[in-house]
């Protein structure tokens, strides 16, 4: 009962789901989400370091705007590492403004309406820090942290500091998460795990399996079956 589609905001995704009352495994991706739940209202999902097990009540409706890596801090007004591994009520960040937004959305909002809220906040902030998109794109393409730092003109410590604020963790962790997602996407095309490991930059299939298990909580074969 999960659906997603591209949003109007560049790189963002709109999604909706209806809970069946069982745990859903949400893999880390370096993103922050603006969420609405029919039970809990407006929430912010911070960037996870490992898979988050989301358990809703049967029939609970969820809507979300998944912002691309590096964009969330401009929308929510706080560094990403302050929200790492957390789900936070929106009013804890925006105070009375969140109450007004909840009233405006009503009890049957749409994902597009959530996107409009995020777009307004992003425009007010003057847009995302362009460094976020540059770093995330290079790491997603498989560039090393050292090469990425050199390309964006930052030293290792400065890149680590900026990455924590933009993504919630340092560039090595982000690179590891993006590599896992790249590998899983390739595996879903039908490539064998040994081939996936080589093409995704792992030492071998055992390295791939170990890394996915640490980040996702289960081995890649289990994720692919689900």
Image (cartoon, rainbow, N blue to C red):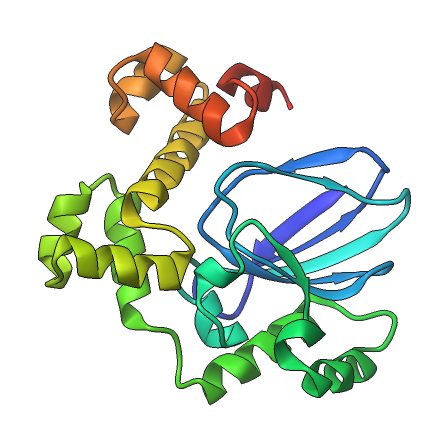
The residue sitting at the right extreme is 58
Residue 224 vertical placement versus 152 (above, below): above
Q: Is residue 214 above or below residue 176?
A: above
Please state, as top left, top right, bottom left or bottom right, where the N terminus lies in the image: top right
In the image, 88 versus 201, the foreground residue is 88
Q: Where 110 sits versus 195, above or below? A: below
Q: Quadrant of residue 172?
A: top left
Image quarter for residue 179?
Answer: top left
In the rendered image, the quadrant that contains the C terminus is: top right
Point 53% across, 15% down: residue: 221
Above-or-below relation of 33 to 96 = above
Can residue 24 be seen here? The reply is yes
Q: Residue at x 39, y 86 (%)?
A: 126
144 on left or right of 16: left
Q: Position of residue 12 (x, y in %)?
A: 50, 61
Taking the image as shown, residue 36 lies to the left or right of residue 131, namely right
Q: Position of residue 186 (x, y in %)?
A: 40, 28
Q: Is residue 168 left or right of residue 41?
A: left
Do we see residue 188 in this rendering?
A: no
> x, y percentage for residue 160?
26, 55
Residue sitting at 13 percent across and 45 percent down? 146
Q: Residue at the spot x=57%, y=75% of the render?
A: 118
């Amino acid at each position: 009962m999960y659906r997603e589609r591209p949003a109007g905001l560049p790189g963002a995704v709109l999604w909706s789901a209806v809970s069946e009352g069982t745990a859903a495994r949400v893999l880390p991706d370096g993103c922050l989400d603006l969420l609405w739940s029919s039970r809990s209202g407006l929430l912010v999902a911070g960037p996870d370091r490992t898979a988050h097990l989301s358990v809703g009540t049967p029939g609970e409706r969820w809507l979300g705007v998944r912002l691309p890596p590096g964009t969330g801090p401009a929308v929510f007004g706080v560094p990403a590492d302050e929200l790492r591994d957390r789900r936070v009520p929106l009013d804890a960040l925006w105070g009375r403004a969140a109450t007004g937004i909840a009233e405006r959305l009503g009890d049957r909002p749409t994902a597009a309406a959530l996107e409009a809220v995020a777009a307004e906040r992003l425009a007010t902030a003057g847009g995302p820090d362009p460094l976020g998109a540059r770093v995330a794109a290079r790491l997603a393409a498989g560039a090393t942290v050292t090469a990425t730092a050199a390309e964006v003109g930052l030293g290792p410590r400065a890149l680590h500091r900026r990455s924590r604020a933009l993504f919630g963790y340092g560039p090595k962790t982000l690179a590891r998460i993006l590599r896992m997602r790249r590998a899983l996407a390739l595996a879903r095309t039908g490539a064998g795990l040994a081939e996936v490991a080589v093409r995704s930059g792992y030492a071998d299939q055992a390295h791939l399996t170990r890394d996915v298990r640490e980040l996702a909580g289960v081995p890649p074969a289990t994720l692919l079956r689900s």
